[in-house]
């Protein structure tokens, strides 16, 4: 966590912008929408709104207010996500059972903490501000992570409602995707990981060396049309394409398509945040697990990229941090656009599964104290995803960002970019 040179005004301004965007995203949702938890991985919208507030209250106000008392002592317990150092917490899978505080009371909680935090920032001396500013900044990026989760979660909540409610946005255009192209990368001894100024999570450091054999990355994401070919070739029914654990999930859960697809009279439809529409073959496939991504790669005779390959290729290809992120307000992936000879759909559209397990970089040490629980303790049984998606806030994407989800997670807006060369491909 860096931050040099935050002035009180700049910190308050960024705080206000970040907090307002959360409320903007929640605005189309009724108090009833905001209360539902449709599965254990999903959190209610109002829980997200309260938890990010709890983060500022716990990690900033409790350390800086002279006579600190929580806004509500029960909130300390209800809205702690996973911080063992802070104390006990309410059961995650049961968050949808909590009808009170309601959405309005959560708004009052937010408003109270907002006022107190602005006051604290404005009244601190320079030394105290320098000490607390990195934690406030971490709170911004934490809230942005929950803005993305809020959208992923409400998508699932609305998907289980037979009335097929919509959130916002409009369908993407249709078009013919071009044949998959490739960008060749020389490899060799490269460096990955964050360096220099600018915010980064602790898991993006230290910068370190990695050896890459020459390789190629696909110049766009795998499309729905290509995924339909995989399905038509019995991709979900051929054990030889799947890792053993993945095949177990296929059998146990009856997977036969991406998460939000349903078949009606021989036509596949996809649930999106802007309604349920026939599957658009030119869009990137989305809401597939690591296991499905890996099986697709095996079927196509290719593989998934390692995270070092992804980062090195994106940086050496000079891709700007821009794309179909949340500010485009599509809230869904869109077609790749014309061929450019460069990597397309790098930032935005879909988080891209890599073949890299989420492990600490060489020399990584979690920060001291409760904040050390933010990332480090999750470095087990998860895979790294890169790039960002159509629900990611625009200043929350960067080349070194390491997202992570368990192998079987499908409710995240995840997709597939293929790699080739550089490492053995397992052919069935
Ligand atoms: Fe959180």
Image (cartoon, rainbow, N blue to C red):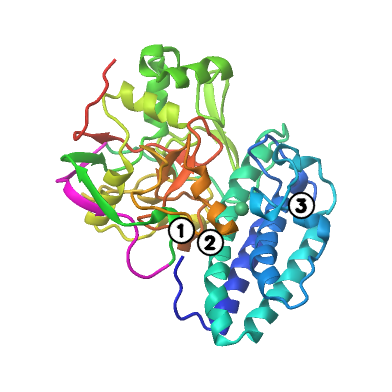
> How far is the residue under mark 3 from the one under mark 2?
22 Å
Residue 17: % across, % down: 59, 71
Please name the residue that numbered disc 1 is placed on: 201
Image height check: is 264 above or below 207? above
Tell which circle, 3 or 1, labels the residue nearer the N-terminal end.
3
Which quarter of the figure has residue 53? bottom right
Badge 2 element: helix
Residue in view at x 46 percent, y 81 percent: 5
Badge 1 element: loop
Residue 104 visible? The answer is no
Badge 3 element: helix
- In the picture, the disc for residue 141 is 2
Q: Give the residues in magenta.
A: 180-198
Residue 412: % across, % down: 53, 40
Residue in view at x 54 percent, y 84 percent: 127
Asked whether the beta carbons under mark 3 and mark 2 sit within 8 Å of each other, the answer is: no
Which quarter of the figure has residue 70? bottom right
Please name the residue that numbered disc 3 is placed on: 77
């Amino acid at each position: 966590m860096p931050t040099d040179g935050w002035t009180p005004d700049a910190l308050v301004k960024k705080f206000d912008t970040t907090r307002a965007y959360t409320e903007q995203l929640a605005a189309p949702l009724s108090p009833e929408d905001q209360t539902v938890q449709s599965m254990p991985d999903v959190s209610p919208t109002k829980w997200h709104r309260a938890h990010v507030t709890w983060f500022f209250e716990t990690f900033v106000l409790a350390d800086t207010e002279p006579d600190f008392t929580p806004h509500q002592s029960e909130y300390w317990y209800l809205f702690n996500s996973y911080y063992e150092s802070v104390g006990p917490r309410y059961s995650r899978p049961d968050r949808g059972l909590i009808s009170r505080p309601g959405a309005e009371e959560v708004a009052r909680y937010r408003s109270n903490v907002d006022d107190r935090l602005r006051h604290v920032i404005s009244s601190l001396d320079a030394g105290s501000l320098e000490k607390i500013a990195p934690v406030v900044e971490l709170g911004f990026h934490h809230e942005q992570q929950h803005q993305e989760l809020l959208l992923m979660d409400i998508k699932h909540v609305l998907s289980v409602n037979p009335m097929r409610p919509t959130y916002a946005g409009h369908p993407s255009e249709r078009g013919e995707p071009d044949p998959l192209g490739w960008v060749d990368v020389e490899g060799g001894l490269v460096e990955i990981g964050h360096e220099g100024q600018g915010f980064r999570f602790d898991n993006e450091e230290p910068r370190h060396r990695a050896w890459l054999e020459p390789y190629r990355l696909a110049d766009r994401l795998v499309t729905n049309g290509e995924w339909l070919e995989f399905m038509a070739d019995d991709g979900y029914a051929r054990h030889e394409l799947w890792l053993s654990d993945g095949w177990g999930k296929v059998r146990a859960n009856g997977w036969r398509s991406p998460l939000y697809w349903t078949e009606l009279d021989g036509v596949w439809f996809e649930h999106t945040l802007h309604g349920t529409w026939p599957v658009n073959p030119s869009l990137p496939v989305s809401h597939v697990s690591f296991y499905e991504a890996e099986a697709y790669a095996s079927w196509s005779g290719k593989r998934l990229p390692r995270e070092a390959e992804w980062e090195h290729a994106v940086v050496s290809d000079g891709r700007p941090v821009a794309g179909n992120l949340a500010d485009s307000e599509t809230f869904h992936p869109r077609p790749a656009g014309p061929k450019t000879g460069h990597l397309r759909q790098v930032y935005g559209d879909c988080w891209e599964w890599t073949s890299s397990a989420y492990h600490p970089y060489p020399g990584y040490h979690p920060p001291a104290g409760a904040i050390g629980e933010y990332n480090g303790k999750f470095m087990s049984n998860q895979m790294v995803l890169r790039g960002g998606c159509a629900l990611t806030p625009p200043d929350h994407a960067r080349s070194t960002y390491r997202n992570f989800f368990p192998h079987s997670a499908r409710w995240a807006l995840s997709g597939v970019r293929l790699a080739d060369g550089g490492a053995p491909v397992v052919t069935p």
